[in-house]
């Protein structure tokens, strides 16, 4: 069966460290993978999109990698800040029709 | 924020009653989506629309219907609400007017529905 798994439900790190979140998938062959941030009581907000032929994408302190052989994406936040505390969702396309989301990882950055 | 508004923001209803949730966009995007979000399940696609009067089912469409008579409005109807439909419902639109897989989604802030 098809599955998207985000490595853990919760991740706690100290301010200034790099947070690394993992998204693994099985029985999908996505052409694109996206990452979203969700704050409590709000809808998800798009962060980054990476294509299957791109190994890495960066935006400010964010970096995403996409390994189609391992069927895995890594999402990094460098120099993390308490304001980065949120739930992060990975999503990938299914048959080119709609996005399928992982359950998310809740990141807490302590000062 | 992308121009996307969901109404109502909160609703409490009784089992067996019909409920309609509204999503309104001002971006003129072709694609619109309804997701529900539940603890332990994450976001799951209910229905989506790829144009006026063009809709298709998602992963959890049973018990739901949708309509899109205008580009800007996408309605989600629970024909006869059940307690299992208690959830937070999110509407989303595709930026750039393309299909979602290569375009980011813009989400509304959700409707919290409680069925008692």
Image: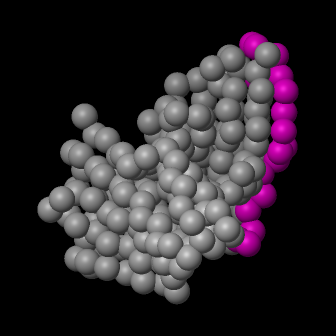
In-front residue for pair B16/A84: A84
**Residue furthest out toward the left:** A69
The colour scheme used here is one colour
Relative to A98, is B96 above or below?
below
Toward which corner of the image does residue B38 lie, by quadrant?
top right
**Residue at image location 28% in from the left, 40% down from the top:** A2
Q: Is residue B105 left or right of residue B71?
A: left
**Residue at image location 52% in from the left, 33% down from the top:** B40
In-front residue for pair B28/A97: A97
Image coordinates of residue B1 in percent, x first then y, are: 73, 72
A73 falls in the magenta region: no
**Residue at image location 18% in from the left, 59% down from the top:** A70
**Residue furthest out toward the bottom:** A60
Relative to A1, is B4 above or below?
below
In-front residue for pair A81/B62: A81
Residue B28 visible: no
Image coordinates of residue B53 in percent, x first then y, are: 58, 49
Residue B13 visible: yes
Q: Please report the bounds of the magenta region as a residue range.
A: B1-18
Report the quarter where the C terminus of chain B lies. Answer: top right
Q: Is residue A42 left or right of residue A74?
A: right
Number of callouts in the render? Answer: 0
Q: Is residue B21 left or right of residue A6?
A: right
In-front residue for pair B24/B14: B14
Toward which corner of the image does residue B31 lie, by quadrant?
bottom right
Image coordinates of residue A20 in percent, x first then y, are: 42, 65
Image coordinates of residue B107 in percent, x first then y, are: 65, 59
Q: Is residue A95 left or right of residue A105?
A: left
**Residue at image location 69% in from the left, 39% down from the top:** B88
């Amino acid at each position: 069966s098809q599955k998207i798994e985000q490595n853990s439900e919760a991740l706690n790190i100290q301010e200034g460290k790099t947070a690394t979140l993992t998204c693994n998938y099985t029985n999908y062959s996505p052409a694109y993978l996206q990452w979203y941030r969700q704050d409590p009581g709000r809808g998800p907000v798009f962060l980054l999109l990476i294509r299957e032929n791109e190994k890495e994408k960066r935006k400010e302190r964010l970096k995403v990698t996409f390994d189609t052989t391992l069927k895995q994406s890594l999402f990094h936040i460098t120099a993390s800040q308490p304001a980065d505390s949120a739930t992060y969702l990975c999503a990938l396309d299914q048959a080119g029709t709609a996005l399928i989301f992982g359950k998310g990882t809740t990141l807490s950055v302590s000062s | 924020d992308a121009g996307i508004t969901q109404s109502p923001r909160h609703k409490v209803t009784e089992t067996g009653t019909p409920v309609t949730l509204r999503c309104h966009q001002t971006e003129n995007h072709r694609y619109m989506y309804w997701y529900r979000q539940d603890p332990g399940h994450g976001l799951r696609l209910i229905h989506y629309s790829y144009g006026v009067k063009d809709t298709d089912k998602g992963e959890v469409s049973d018990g739901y219907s949708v309509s899109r008579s205008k580009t800007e409005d996408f309605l989600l109807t629970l024909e006869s609400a059940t307690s299992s439909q208690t959830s937070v419902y999110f509407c989303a639109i595709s930026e750039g007017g393309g299909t979602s897989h290569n375009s980011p989604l813009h989400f509304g802030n959700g409707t919290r529905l409680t069925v008692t």
